[in-house]
Every structure is written in structure tokens, then in C-alpha cells.
Amino acid sequence: MNQDGALALLLPLIHAQRAPALWVLGEHGGAGMPAPNAAVAVLSNRVDVSDEMRAAGWAAQFSDFDFAPWPAGSLEAIFFRVAKEKPVVHHVINAAAERLAPGGRLLLSGAKQQGIKTYAKHAAERLGGALEFRKMGHQYLAVVQRGAAVGAALDDRDYPRLRPVIEDGTLRYLTKPGLYGWDKVDAGSALLVAHLPDCAPQRVCDLGCGYGYLSVQAWLKLQPQQVVASDNNAAAVLACCANFAAHGVAGEVCAADCGTGIEGVFDLVLCNPPFHQGFGVEYDLTERFVAAARRLTAQGGQALFVTNAFLPIEKVARRHYARITTLADDGRFRVTQLMP
Ligand SMILES: C[S@@+](CC[C@H](N)C(=O)[O-])C[C@H]1O[C@@H](n2cnc3c(N)ncnc32)[C@H](O)[C@@H]1O
């Protein structure tokens, strides 16, 4: 992954930080991180990012941006490259108002089209302190001071709470902001479900499960003995666990980077791989998901992928699977069956 320009703006400041601070890392974490700084803890909602940071020597925590480990007023700085979703950004700004000591700073970075100017203005109102705004190339850095008295909380759509938002026929799914397409059924996933096989698989694996739509559908339609679902996003793992419980799915949900650590093989592997990572487009992930699916597909089993129709899935799949069949293509999404 190429390093994100807005994230890069924060790195020298994180490196120079001496008083207790927190670096909040979401979908932009990962590549080319600097050497660890003992004054700065890391909080990430991505398991791959927190694992990588820990391996590099950082004190990193993985959670759905749960700030509870840092008491009110305990931090002198919080660094955050703004995330794609507004409720996430507002959640972090609200947490900064509580966790920063008076005089502490929230350092936000992002590009203009990502709403950084509006976020900075709202952060200054929330933190009740001065705002300094710097343009650096195409990116912006906002330094917001925590004043003596803070302002009203920003609307984060009650970020931590799971809620029954999605109705799909008679089914309801628990979901929340902070996970991919949290308030809808993904059109690609719906196309995949329409092409689930006629078989009765014993074991199903769902890679990049989100709130668990594919798993729950496979459970209800195919009645396997077990479903194993995984995602690298903490919010997705929480929501998927809740939906497994709500729909009586027998199985397990784990936080994993492209299925790393899942053991055994499965008769059916399902995957709607992410196409957009952060604000950019990520092709390498497709390759990693296909390779993981191959490792997890039993002889005689199959994987079903749904991808954007213009993604070269066959080219990637040929490197891993012997038989590749397009089951559906509606011009937007393609369902591809992969067999060893
Ligand atoms: C297009 S969404 C599909 C979600 C879900 N399967 C559905 O059908 O609604 C892709 C999912 O992959 C997850 N994801 C992204 N990168 C990942 C990675 N490296 N490892 C595991 N999951 C990842 C995202 O968090 C997201 O939930």
C-alpha cells in the first residue's frame, strides 16, 4: 500500500511528541510507519494495523475506537488522520474533548474534499480552544487546542451502539457506523446470495464478513453445520457476533487480516472483497483474499466471490484455482465461482 499523504503529515509530529499522547489509526494505517515513540500509544480499529504496529514496537490496542483505557484529561495530544465516515470522525473528536488535558492538542489531517476544514471548525467548537490550520501541498493539518471549557458533543450517530437498521424481507441485522456499508444490504452481496449453490456444505467460511450478511444468508439457506466468519475491522466483528447470536448461527467470528489464522478447510468460502480501502482503490487486497480463499477451500469445495464487474478477478484467480466460472454479471457486479 502506498503511504497516505495526509497520514504522512502527522508522522514528524508523532515522532517529536514527548508528553503522553494517542495516535488513532483507522483504514489508513499500515505502510511505512516510523520507529516507535514510547510517549505515544496507538489505538486502531483494524487488527492488521494494530498487529503491525505492535510488531514494530508500538504499544497498540485493537478495539472499535474504545477510549476507555485513557482516563479523562490524561492525554496531551491525539493524532488522527480523518476517516472516511463522519460518525467515526465525530466519535474521535468527542473522545478528544474528554481525554485531552486542558491545553492539550488534537491534530487532524486530511484533504479538502474529505471535509477536513469542516471537521477542524467543529473540533474547535467541541474542544473550546484555538484552531490553527495549515495547508501542506494538497493536504491540510488542523491543530485544535482543548480549551478550559468544552462545547456540545458532535453528532456521532451514537457510534458505539449496535442497532437493528437493516431489514431484508423479514430479517433484521444489527449494525453500526464504522463498518462498511453499515446501513444497507450490499447490492453485490445480494447478487452472490442469489447464486448460492444448491449443495449442503458442512463448513462455510466468510472472508471480510462485515456485519455478517453473507454468513447469515448461507446459514439460513444452506443449513451448514458451522460458519466461520472474519473481518479485520473491530466494528464488523462486534456486529457479526451479534447477528450470529440473533439468528442462531452456529459458528465463530474472529478478527483476522484476510483470514490469517483461520485453520482447516471449508466446502464453501464466500467473499465480497473490499474494493475501496480508505479513500483509495486497493487491488492487492483482491489477490490476498483470493489466495486466502484458496488455502481455505477443500478439495471438491468451492469459493464464491462477488466483485465490481471491472475488477480483473479471473486473472487473479487463475494463479490460484483450476476452474473459474462466471455465475452472474449484472454490469455492476460479477459473481465468480472458483474451484481447485
Ligand atoms: C465489501 S465489504 C463486504 C462486507 C460483507 N461481507 C457484506 O457482504 O456486507 C468488505 C469487507 O472486508 C473487510 N476487510 C477489508 N480489508 C480486510 C482485510 N485486510 N482483512 C479482512 N477483512 C477486510 C471490510 O472491513 C469489509 O467488512
Image (cartoon, rainbow, N blue to C red):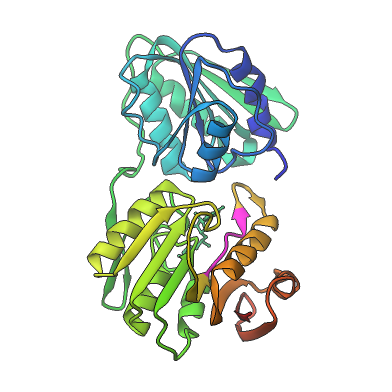
Left/right of residue 329 with respect to residue 261 in the rendered view: right
Residue 275 painted magenta: yes
> What residue appears at the point 57 percent right and 63 percent down from the top-left corner?
273
Q: Nearer the viewer, residue 150 or 267?
A: 267
Frontmost residue, 95 versus 205: 205
> Where residue 320 sits in the image (x, y, percent)?
69, 71
Residue at 36% from the left image edge and 14% from the top image edge: 74
Above or below for 217 versus 254: below
Q: Give the answer, above or below, for where 265 lies relative to 80.
A: below
Quarter of the image where the C terminus is located: bottom right
Q: Quadrant of the N terminus?
A: top right
Residue 184 point in image, percent of width and height: 41, 64
Q: Residue furthest bottom?
A: 198
How many badges with numbers are in the image? 0
Q: Nearer the viewer, residue 135 or 255?
A: 255
The spot of residue 62 in percent (x, y) is 43, 38
Position of 263 compared to 171: left or right?
right
Task: State left or right for residue 18 relative to residue 112.
Answer: left
- The overriding secondary structure of the stretch rendered in magenta is loop
Q: Find residue 150 and report its image quarter.
A: top left
Drawn side of residue 107 relative to residue 252, left or right: right
Task: Tell me which segment is drawn in magenta.
Answer: 271-276
Residue 175 appears in view: no
Magenta run includes residue 129: no
Residue 203 at x, y = what percent? 41, 75
Residue 147 at least partly seen: yes
**What residue sits 31% from the left and 26% below the top?**
152
Above or below 318: residue 251: above
